[in-house]
Image: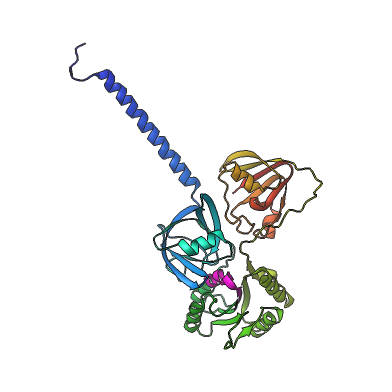
Amino acid sequence: MVNAFPGINFAIYFERLSILHSYFIMLFKIFKKNQEENHSNAKILTLRVRETVQETPDTVSIYFEQPEPFLDYLPGQFLSVILVINGKEERRSYSLCTSPFMDPFPGITVKRLKGGLVSNHINDYFRPGKKVSIMKPMGNFVTDFHSKNKRNYGMIAGGSGITPILSNLKSVLINEPLSKVNLLYCSRTEEMTIFSDILAGLEEKYPGRLSVTHNLTQPGSDWKGLTGRLDKPKIAAYYKERFSDPSFESMFFVCGPVGLMDTAEDTLASFGVPKEIILIEQFFKELPLDEGNEDAPEIIRPVTIILEGQEFTFDVPPGKTILEAGLDEDLDMPYSCQSGLCTACRGKLLSGKVKMLEEAGLTDEEINEGYILCCSSKPEGSDIKIQIE
């Protein structure tokens, strides 16, 4: 056969063509893998910091540019920030201080904690333009708003617990013209009162619909308001003064230190306020120690989880939770606060038995239906299977 193109070596030509074909197949596989990974990480978004506002000497609000499409969240929910600090991934949950009905840009408020790795990092290094990975908004400190509602909202906050309270407070004022809000807010000093200017502005803008009562535990000499701890007598007086009108439907939001929330809930209950209309929001806390039988043998127990349609079985050693053991196996199990409050790691127990060290993030109905929190659960017995949703 005569070569019509004497300058071309067809053997080399077809060999290179085959290599090029293999290269494109490899690129397609990489693209497909990335698409699958993006789908599996659909709960993680990247936001860009738009503005930082120093609320108090130890508290900063971070406002983000709106992504495309807009960030869809409910008043009272929180964002889980994902950061890499000192080579290790850290996740922390922070309540949204903004309302999707009033504020154009979503924002969180972060108070420094003594020794707090993430809270101090955010206060020190977050600046406009910084890109931040977050998990999509979560949380159950929410209610439905309607223009026909005629409610008297009791909101009791302590310290940074004002953050999700503010989100809900704004949403009531703009959505429910027949409703009113009575806020009882405990801070340390006037200087340390978060959102003091914002609250004063809203009180002026919505006269007769928003009433803010401040309580300071370390007041200055010229302070004329409530002082000392926000105890049962103060909360009782607040309730009797503000919630005597039967023409309004009552609803309560409580967020702050655990002691304050317990006192508020107990005081409201003493007046016959149903538990169903008292919403409590708990922030991060350390899980209790698992004080089991010291003489019991340390048993490694296998656990099977169903994650994105696939089954994975791994061993959970003594001293570790199901989530911790799963992450040690490099499984992409969802989680956020790791303290049993945010429910990001919620799963349904299909078989077997576990011990939950903390279940505050779950409702009684969810617990009865078999849901558990992997971050606070340890296996007891065998044949444990969990469906991660």
Q: Residue at x 60, y 86 (%)?
A: 225
Tell me if residue 23 is in the magenta stretch. no
332 versus 58 height, above or below? above
Percent across and percent down for residue 199 are 51, 78
Q: Where is residue 38 shown, x and y percent of the image?
A: 46, 46
**Span of residues in magenta:** 153-168
Residue 163 colored in magenta in the image: yes
Q: Residue at x 55, y 55 (%)?
A: 91
Please say if 165 is above or below 287.
below
Residue at the image point whose x is 48% and y is 63% from the top: 124
In the picture, which quadrant includes the N terminus?
Answer: top left
Residue projecting furthest to the top: 1
Residue 158, image quadrant = bottom right
Left or right, 131 with respect to 213, comes to: left
Colour scheme of the rendered structure: rainbow
Q: Looking at the picture, does residue 367 appear above or below residue 167?
A: above
Q: Is residue 273 visible?
A: no
Could one spot residue 180 in this view of the protein?
Answer: yes
Left or right of 327: which side holds 83? left
Q: Main secondary structure of the magenta part?
A: helix
Q: In this rendering, is residue 152 above or below 276?
A: below
* Image location of residue 11, percent across then percent down: 28, 18
Q: Foreground residue, 134 or 181?
A: 134
Pick out the residue farthest to the right: 295
Q: Nearer the viewer, residue 370 or 3?
A: 3
Residue 37 percent location from the top left of the image? 47, 43
Figure disc tally: 0
